[in-house]
Each structure stands twice: as structure tokens, then as C-alpha cells.
Amino acid sequence: MAVAEFRNEPATDFGREENRRAYEAAIRKVESQFGRDYPLIIGGERVTTAEKIVSRNPAAPSEVVGTTGKAGPAEVDRALEAARKAFETWSRTDPLARARILWKAAAIMRRRKHELSATMTVEVGKTWPEADADTAEAIDFLEFYGREMARLAQAQPLTRLMGEDNEVYYLPLGVGVIHSPFNFPLAILTGMTSAAIVAGNTVLVKPSVHTPVIAAKFFEILEEAGLPPGVANYVPGDPAEIGEMLTTDPRIHFVSFTGSAAVGAKIHEQAARVQPGQRFLRRVVAEMGGKDAIIVDSEVDVDEAVLGIVTSAFGFGGQKCSACSRAIVLEDRYDEVLEKVTKAAQALRLGDPRRPEVQMGPVGSEAAYRRVLEYIQIGRGEGRLVTGGGAPEGLGDGYFVSPTIFADVDPHARIAQEEIFGPVLAFFKAGSFEEAVAIANDTQYGLTGSVYSRNRANLEYARREFHVGNLYFNRKCTGALVGVHPFGGFKMSGTDSKAGGRDYLLLFTQAKSVSEKF
Ligand SMILES: NC(=O)c1ccc[n+]([C@@H]2O[C@H](COP(=O)([O-])OP(=O)(O)OC[C@H]3O[C@@H](n4cnc5c(N)ncnc54)[C@H](O)[C@@H]3O)[C@@H](O)[C@H]2O)c1
Ligand SMILES: N[C@@H](CCC=O)C(=O)O
């Protein structure tokens, strides 16, 4: 295989005038597409529905980014049949030919990079660098999983037995469903979909109701890259109406879900039930929420720690499963860190992320806005409000929430235990490093965590005892890179599937061992 070694897609340098102009032009282009309708795509055909999903700009909710078809049970049924039919040929297609479609899609994404990023700026409120990173990660997934399939398609190392020919083949599972979240509406959607299809499966893709337009653009790219009809079917819809069918239908071999713990647990339970006519155990890959902590030790570069906390807590308004929602600080550093983080949070520029200077946009939807404000109310009764505490003045009717910090929070308070998924950070004082790690571990989640320390013994202690799927030392706890930081969490953060890692494709395959005696 003459494919170049995998390398992460570089971030766009917005310090350069030509890149700023290109992004501004992309925003104008995306605005000119406002109000467009994107039908469902089933078996390669555009399917228009009477009911629509309306996608709004969370910074200016009167702006309709686009409308899309809304799949009901009849459309899901049709898509399942299309996927089942496509599986017959796609599962037998040369794995390298499947990989080449991913690489072609990556090339198209690079050409449309700013348009895709700008779509996320208006559809979900991502700032320029956050949107750019989302698109770059999507490209990385396509490049990486294509190479991973090529690797798995090669002869696997086995112990050789005289007189026998032994091989292992990685075969696809069948028809699967992709439920993707709103917060990485291109990267995670692309990663989940591309891994499943490059392994030879066929899928129904149901993106978040808040981000169906960027998902429709992903489908345009798959089509242009030459993906045969029916291999991936675009079926946005209301989970209350089609969610259960999309988990329990006996034609569905696997469910790949990324989202909240509550929904993931429900899907896990529903999927486990063997349905009449179902001749296999359904597989579930579930990547769920986090309540991630950064520990600041006594021996530390405080300014580095402050930067790491602010970036991890307020990047994309705290709407990352990896976001720091808990700062656990050793008592001799507590006041200094709290004061510096508060100042830095107050200095963040909030506003419509179409403007390049904006560092934090709105939260992704009206539902998110209401939930976050509700948690802030709860926090007022559970901790000392240091800054923020609600919606800022003068930003119109967008879903803006000020960066909010609560100090002196009890580790068992609700805002210390429940995922808020917004720009809300709680501070905890720890009497020892061991106590700090114990507080960090004491939630149902176990996704990311970070430690700022110059004490080697403490770092080794955390390496052993801090129980999370992605642990970072002396750096922020967000921003995992494909191929570099395989991503996924413990406990109620999910099935630890390690997206962007070398084990990930195995989740969408079954290994067949063939032995011939000569
Ligand atoms: N661990 C990770 O890798 C990771 C990555 C990104 C986001 N997340 C988590 O995702 C959440 C934010 O995303 P969200 O608000 O879109 O999550 P969500 O749970 O509301 O929705 C996720 C997906 O599941 C679908 N869904 C909702 N209810 C369903 C049901 N009953 N049956 C079937 N499907 C259903 C949604 O339509 C969406 O496609 C946060 O909890 C965040 O931590 C986790
Ligand atoms: N992989 C992303 C988080 C994905 C969840 O929202 C990160 O590492 O920050």
C-alpha cells in the first residue's frame, strides 16, 4: 500500500490575513445558504418529508440555518432495507477500495474546510479555532481509519503450525446505527460513520436534531467521494419517535452511540434484549459524558495551570465531554489559582462567533441554555458564586451564558457530581494530593483528567490512581488528537472504545479464523 504515513491535519493559522479573509468568505457563503432544505438520503435517493427539522443559529435563533427531512418509522424501515441490501455488496468490496473512499472524502473535506467549519460556527456556535479543529479532526478520522482498515486487511501474525494454513479475517457485522451528539457535529459524526463503513458495514446515521445541516454536508461529501447508495443513509429524526426502533429493530446488528450517560444507558439496556427473529447479540459502542477534573498540586507553575483550567473549562463554552468542570486545588495554592482563573474567565470575549475576536459563543440550543441556567441556580445554593451566574447583558436573544465559577463546593454537591455541559466550573480545596485524587475519582464518570504538578512522586501516584480513560499531565484535559490520544472513558463515561486509536475498528468487525490442513 503506497499511502503516506498518517499525520494530523494542521490547525489553520488565523493570524494570517489570507486565512481570515477565507473564513469570512466562508461565513458569507454559508449565510447565503440559510433556509435551504436538505432531504433525507435513503438508498441514494433524496426523500422529502412533510415534517421538517428546523436548525437555528444559537447566537441568533431567528436565523434558520436550514431545514432537513424528519424520518419517522416508515423512513427508518425503508433505510434499514436499503442498508441491508447494500451490505450484500459493500461487505464483499475490497477493504482497500473502501479505504480509498474515505481518503477521497478527506481530500474533499480539505477543499471545503472553511465552509464546513463556518457551518458549525452558525449551526452550533463554534468559534473559528474550535470549528477549524472540529473539521481537522474529521479529516484525521477519515485518513486514520482508512489506514487502519488497510492494516487489518493484511495477513495477521499467527503462530504457525506445520502442515496447516491459518488465517484470520476481520469481517463486518451487518447493518448498524450511528447516533451522534451535537457538540462535535462533524468530527464525531465522521469518525463514528467512517469507522463503521470502512470495516464493511452499512449504516443509518441519525445526527443530533440540533446539527442536521452539517451532517447533510457530510453526506454530500460521501456521495462525491463515490460511496455506493445505501451504504450510509441520512435519517435525522426525533429520538422520542424513532430512537427505540433505531436500537431494537431485529435488523440492527450494532448501535454506535455518543452522547449523554442517561441516553447511553437506556440504549445499552434496550439493545441487550434479543428480539424475535434476531439471530445475533447486538453490539453497543457507547461514548458518554464526563465530570472531568484538573488537579493543581502545591509544586506547580500556577500560570500554566490557570491557562489549562480556563481553556478546558470554557473552550466551546464547556460543551465538551472532556471539559474541566472541577478544579481541585491543594489548599496552599487555592486562593491564588481561584483568583487568577476568575480574572482570566472574566476577560474572555463572549459574543456571536462569526466575529473572529470572539472566544466563547452561545451554548448549542435553547434546551441547553435552560439546563445550564437551572444548574447555575442550583449552584447558588451549593457554593460561593465568584463570577458569572447567568445570561450576559447586551447579546440579544442568543443562548449566551457567562463563564461561571463557584468556589468552596462540597464534592458531593449536585454541581460537583452531575454533568452540566456548559461554562460552569466548580472549585474544591484539597488538604493533600491523595485527597485531591480521591475527590477527582468520586463521581460516576471517568473520562478525562489532568494534573498540574512538578512533583514526580505525585505524578506517578496519579498515573496509577486517577481513574480516567484519558489522563493528562501539565496540559489541558481537552483536545485529544486522532492517533495520538486514543479517546474514551471508564465507568459511566462509556465503553472505553478509544476513538482515534488502533483498537477502534475491531468494535465494528468480527474475526473469522480459517484453518486448512494440508
Ligand atoms: N465520550 C465521548 O466521546 C463524548 C463525545 C461527545 C459528547 N459526549 C457527550 O454527549 C453529550 C452531549 O451531546 P448531546 O446533548 O447531543 O447528547 P444526547 O444524549 O442528548 O444525544 C446524543 C445522540 O443520541 C440521540 N438520542 C437522544 N435520545 C435518544 C434515544 N432515546 N434513543 C436513541 N437516540 C437518542 C440524539 O438524537 C443524538 O443523536 C454530553 O453528555 C457529552 O459528554 C461524549
Ligand atoms: N475528543 C474531544 C472531546 C469530545 C467530546 O466532547 C477532546 O478530547 O476534547
Image (cartoon, rainbow, N blue to C red):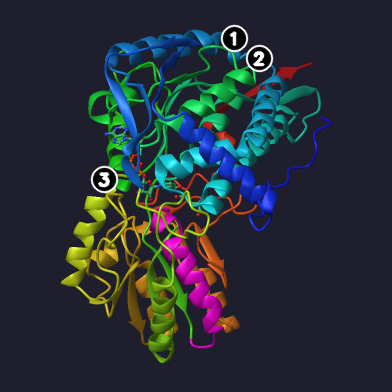
Q: Position of residue 112 (x, y in %)?
A: 62, 33
**Mark 1 burial class by Cα count in 10 Å: few <14, some 14-19, many 20+:** few
Horizontally, is 378 left or right of 318 in the view? Answer: left
Can you give x and y, in whole percent of width and height, for residue 394 in the image? Answer: 30, 60
Q: Is residue 309 magenta?
A: yes
Say if mark 1 contacts mark 2, CB within 8 Å: yes
User: Crowding near pointer 2: few (<14 within 10 Å), some, many (20+)?
Assistant: few
- Residue 115 versus residue 411: which sits nearer the camera? 115
Residue at point 65% right, 51% down?
Answer: 11
The residue lying at 70 percent from left, 17 percent from top is 94
Q: Is residue 342 magenta?
A: no
Residue ID for mark 1:
89
In the image shown, does 158 or 49 lie closer to the viewer?
49
> What is the quadrant of residue 424 in the picture?
bottom left
Which residues are the magenta region? 298-321
| Position of residue 253 measured from the top left corner of the image (x, y, whole percent) | 43, 23
Q: Which mark is residue 93?
A: 2
Quadrant location of the C terminus in the rendered image: top right
- Residue closest to the far bottom: 332
Q: Is residue 201 above or below residue 149?
A: above
Quadrant location, ligand no. 1 = top left
- Of the residues shown, which amino acid type is indicated by label 2? Thr
The residue that mark 3 highlights is 366
Q: Indicate the position of residue 117 as horizontal and vertical percent values.
A: 54, 41
